[in-house]
Amino acid sequence: MPMPDVVIRAGRLLDGSGLPAVTADIAIRDGAVAEIGRVRDRAHRIIDADGALVIPGLTALMPPPSVAPFDRNAARHLAPGVTTVVEELPASATTADAVAAYLHHLRAQPALLSRVILASHHLFRAAVMGNKIRDELASSNADIEAMGTLLGDALDLGARGVLLAPDAPHSERVAVIEELAPRWSERSGEQPVAVMIPTHYDEDLDEALHHARRILSLSDATPSVSCSVIISVPEPVDDPNIGSALSPGSETTVEILIEALSTGRSVPGLGLNPLAFLAGHSPDSTLDLPALIERLADTAALVGLKNRGVIASHNPADINIIDRTHLTDDLSAGVVSTLVSGTEIVSFDELTGEAPGQLL
């Protein structure tokens, strides 16, 4: 068997599997984890992780788009430890041809990080309805059909999911998903489609849950569709937002949504920065590190990247090595090394010049 490309020695492994942390070596070959345990092989590159924490690369939902994830300076503008970004199509991609051209462009570019693209209901809604939105007019049946067609075309071309418009009425969100449902029924065996339902922490909870359940019920009949509620709250690391983000009211909202919407399909990690809730980093922080890592693995799984939240044989080698003595709420001082597909992109806060990311 060929020599491993990289061996990470004696790190403390913690991932989204829910299993206790263990100390082990990791061998990486051809961009994937090849072996975990006591690796005696030599390697082209040895990383000493003795005393360090080894966790999966982070998957983050980003604001609508920039080219930053493909920019070699992107690591300085994104949360440290992020290896995959999930973001919407750009404002210019309002037709099937424009979507195809944009995705082709991404596939052809060197990439620092990997990227997952979502079809944006908000974007296509603006393209279809125009001034009707400004005039606060309701969408017509023809509008719903046109939006559904554009979203379906984007999925067929390579988008991995749909982000419903946060400014659209709940009833319109449901109607758009119902319009898409017949196309989903033809996707059996293909890459799952993620549907993300934005819900603000202080909106009418009963109404939000009612419409979210209707959308979730549509996914129950279609195995290729996964749905999630995105909880949108203020960033608690930024005063004075910490009070409102962690107030009893918003905490209750989050807990009810998690409990009421079936297990595993609510991913609050997509709508807030879970790193900010890491225990010990503010008086109100509650998540311990294992819970944090599991939450971030859920984020990856929602868009079909179940193999990116767990460090296991054959999974992509998207990995962070963290100095536990310098761990902070945003990991900024703690990341010793970040690997994307087994290639080191950041070493001790310096870019290596490699660009192994890809459009997933």
Image (cartoon, rainbow, N blue to C red):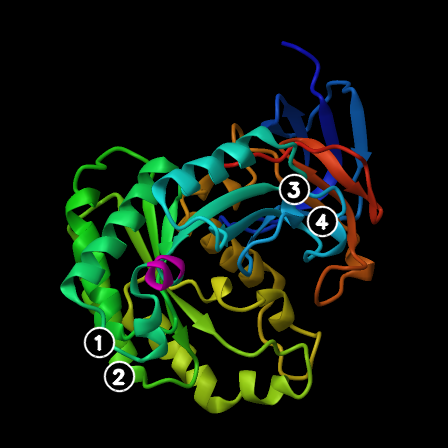
Q: Can residue 18 be seen in this view?
A: no
The quarter in which the N terminus is drawn is: top right
Q: Name the residue under label 2.
A: 206
Picture coordinates of residue 88 (x, y %)? 47, 53
Q: What element carries label 2?
A: helix
In space, the residues marked 1 and 2 are separated at their CA atoms by 6 Å
Magenta stretch: includes residue 68: no
Marks 4 and 3 in Cβ contact (< 8 Å): yes
Q: Are the residues at dot 3 and dot 2 in contact (C-beta closer than 8 Å)?
A: no
Please, what is the three-letter code of the amino acid marked with disc 4? Ala
In the structure shown, which secondary structural element does the residue marked by tag 4 occupy?
A: helix
The local crowd at label 1, few if under 14, some if 14 to 19, many if 20 or more residues have their Cα within 10 Å, is few
Amino acid type indicated by mark 1: His
Query: Label 1's element?
Result: helix
Callout 2 amino acid: Asp
Residue 210's disc number: 1
Distance in Å between CA atoms under marks 3 and 2: 40 Å
Kindly identify which residue carries mark 3.
70
- The mark lying in front, picked from 1 and 4, is 4
